[in-house]
Image (tube, rainbow, N blue to C red):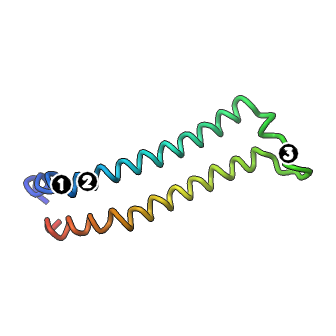
Amino acid sequence: MDDAEAARVAADPRYRELVQRRGRISWTLTAVMLVAYLSFILLIAFDKALLARPIGAGVTSIGIVAGFAVIVLAIVLTGLYVRRAARDFDPLVDALRAEHDA
């Protein structure tokens, strides 16, 4: 792709919409993950007693469940992004490629 073609793609309103929508969801999911992860790290740093508290009469602590929840959240957020990309972004990218022979 030469510079002129790249400029035509960049000027396409569908491309700008794609970049805007993809950026919006990426930043939203990143913010959710950062808040969850930083909250977990801050709990580790400042309230170890809470995380060490056992759940019920078992040996599993709140910290283990919270850590597992952070991992599951990362997997869920990745799945949400992949689903959204496959449903919304990929068809738009394919249409842009077909039109601009990229």
CA distance for labels 2 and 3: 49 Å
Q: Is residue 86 above or below residue 48?
A: below
Other residues around mark 3 within 10 Å, as few (<14) / some (14–19) / many (≥20): some
Q: Amino acid at mark 3?
A: Pro
Horizontal side of 64 relative to 16 (left or right) equals right
Residue 4 or 22: which is nearer the viewer?
22
Residue for point 69% across, 52% down = 68
Q: Earlier in the sequence, mark 2 or mark 3?
A: 2
Q: Amino acid at mark 1?
A: Pro
Which numbered disc covers residue 13?
1
Callout 2: SS: helix
Q: Are marks 1 and 2 in contact (CB under 8 Å)?
A: yes
Residue for point 84% across, 48% down = 55
Q: Are marks 3 and 1 in contact (CB under 8 Å)?
A: no
Q: Is residue 88 above or below residue 62?
A: below
Where is residue 85 shown, x and y percent of the image?
38, 62
Where is residue 10 shown, x and y percent of the image?
17, 52
Callout 3: SS: loop
Residue 13 or 85: which is nearer the viewer?
13
Label 3: which residue?
54
Other residues around mark 2 within 10 Å, as few (<14) / some (14–19) / many (≥20): few
Residue for point 62% across, 56% down = 72
- Furthest toward the top, the residue is 46
Q: Is residue 1 above or below residue 91?
A: above
Q: Amino acid at mark 2?
A: Glu
**Which mark lies nearer to you, 3 or 1?**
1
